[in-house]
Image: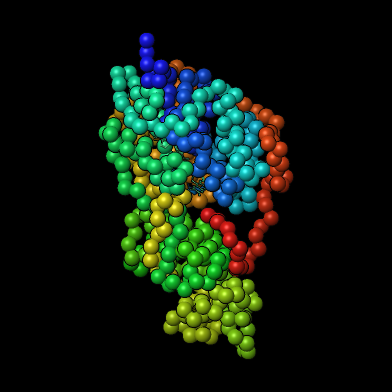
Amino acid sequence: MPDPIHSFFNTDLIIVGGGAAGLAAGITAGETGLRVCILERRHRAGLKILLCGNNRCNVTHDADLGGMLEAYGEPVAEFLQPSLDAFPPARLRSWFAAGGLRTAVHRDGRVFPQSEKADDVVHFFTDRLRELAVPLVLNCPVEAIRAITDGFEAETANLTLRSRFLLLATGGVSYPKTGSVGDGQRFAKALGHRVAPYRAGLAGVEFRQEWTQRVGETSLPATEVRILSAGRHVATTYGEILLTRSGARGPAMVNASRIIARETLRDVSFDVDLHPGLDEKALVARMPNRGGSPAAAIVKMGLLPDGVARDFLKNALRGEGSDAAGIARALKHWRLELKSIRPLKEAMVTVGGVVLEDIDPASMESRKRPGLYFAGEVMDVDGPTGGYNLHAAFSTARLAVASIARRLGKELPPIASPRPERHPRGNRPRGSGGSRTPRSGGARRTGRRRRT
Ligand SMILES: Cc1cc2nc3c(=O)[nH]c(=O)nc-3n(C[C@H](O)[C@H](O)[C@H](O)COP(=O)(O)OP(=O)(O)OC[C@H]3O[C@@H](n4cnc5c(N)ncnc54)[C@H](O)[C@@H]3O)c2cc1C
């Protein structure tokens, strides 16, 4: 008589991790008719998805293959090319629509569920898993993985499962409360893979100019940030800088943090252009040439928000002088020095993970352990803000399942036509889709919010 708790369960595929990659893989496997089971550590699947995009979930970016590859940059782009090619943003959106989740493209290319609710994305996954009768076991942390003859064994406190193929989709190591604590990297290492050291990607930064943390939460909406290492220009990021008491965030700064981590840059400073749309001459022309305080004038012209202008003029004017030309130069070349990057647990993604050379990009199969596959952030894969990280998780998951299916003599079914939109819990879309009203162009103080 087998022990009723420690019984064995045989299946084609065990997926370890019920986050973005694991859930997408589970559905794809279910749609293909594989015998599959997802094991999830936490009491709820997709906890990190719920946090995405300020709880609105920026699921992908409306870009073609070239645009996607350029955004990831090397070495990630080369590795992701086969998965992006097979499952570009347009196909992901069709797949969502086939399951009843409609998405909308914002003016800047970011794609969100039409309802703008991350909850609906998680419901899409769990509803589809239920329809396909794919088992999703919650509160089930995998404690060890063993390679056995003809497959793998995943051990949990109460169950030992066996399967021919195993997919590690356990995520990175940021926001550990969502369940991603580095288990997958530990399992991969024990099975002979190399793991690149972890660094915080897409995190806030602190400047040596500490006054920037005392001005209150302030949005500088359209900046150009030249990243310098030992005075040498390395890369440029664009978009909002959000000054907060705990450092600067916003796409321009968090994307800079990822580049600093990826390229292990030292002695970093930033040359910030607060008005990339206007050259110095045009800025000077806008400034009143006599009377009034310069701070009041630049606030009135919308060049800097109230509260920041005075401190900026006190601290950011170096040798330029406080005449119109000097102020214009300072607005175009605000020099800030990096003090530190916020800790990894606060980062949106982990730079580092299972090294890409140990994985075949054409199949997501391990080069060290045949039959073992990877998807999502457990690998040394990351992208900028804008939907690229979720897209990497979804597309690598799909490629892994397609490769496993082929080994079992099966093909993924074609993506079905869109099904009528579901508003499962009475959710109504906030708009009719398409782009949202653009934000005003001027610099402004903000209320409390968290924006990537
Ligand atoms: C605040 C925040 C906002 C973000 N916003 C966006 C956004 O808008 N757009 C975007 O593209 N990206 C965004 N990201 C990044 C994105 O969420 C991740 O890149 C993505 O979730 C990675 O997917 P994954 O499946 O690899 O890992 P995860 O989603 O982290 O899932 C891993 C899962 O594995 C489970 N697990 C771990 N160990 C075990 C184990 N031993 N046994 C069983 N299960 C285990 C975990 O509990 C977890 O559920 C954001 C991240 C954060 C933190």
Query: Which one is in front, 222 or 196?
Result: 196
Quarter of the N terminus within the rendering: top left
Q: How is the image coloured?
A: rainbow
Query: Which one is in front, 419 or 172?
Result: 172
Residue at image point 40% right, 20% down? 5
In the figure, residue 293 lies in which quadrant?
A: bottom right
In the figure, residue 176 lies in which quadrant?
A: top left
166 displayed left or right of 278: left
Q: Answer above or below: position of 4 versus 416.
A: above
Q: Position of residue 222 (x, y in %)?
A: 56, 63
Q: Position of residue 207 (x, y in %)?
A: 42, 67
Q: Position of residue 130 (x, y in %)?
A: 58, 25
Residue at image point 37% right, 23% down? 160
Furthest residue to the bottom?
291
Residue at image point 62% right, 44% down? 117
Q: Position of residue 384 (x, y in %)?
A: 47, 51
Query: Which one is in front, 334 or 69?
Result: 334
In the figure, residue 122 lies in which quadrant?
A: top right
Q: Answer above or below: position of 257 versus 373.
A: below
Q: Is any atom of residue 158 visible in this view?
A: yes
> How many labels, in total?
0
Q: Answer above or below: position of 295 versus 84.
A: below
Residue at image point 69% right, 40% down? 427
Q: Is any atom of residue 22 visible in this view?
A: no
Furthest residue to the top?
1
345 displayed left or right of 422: left
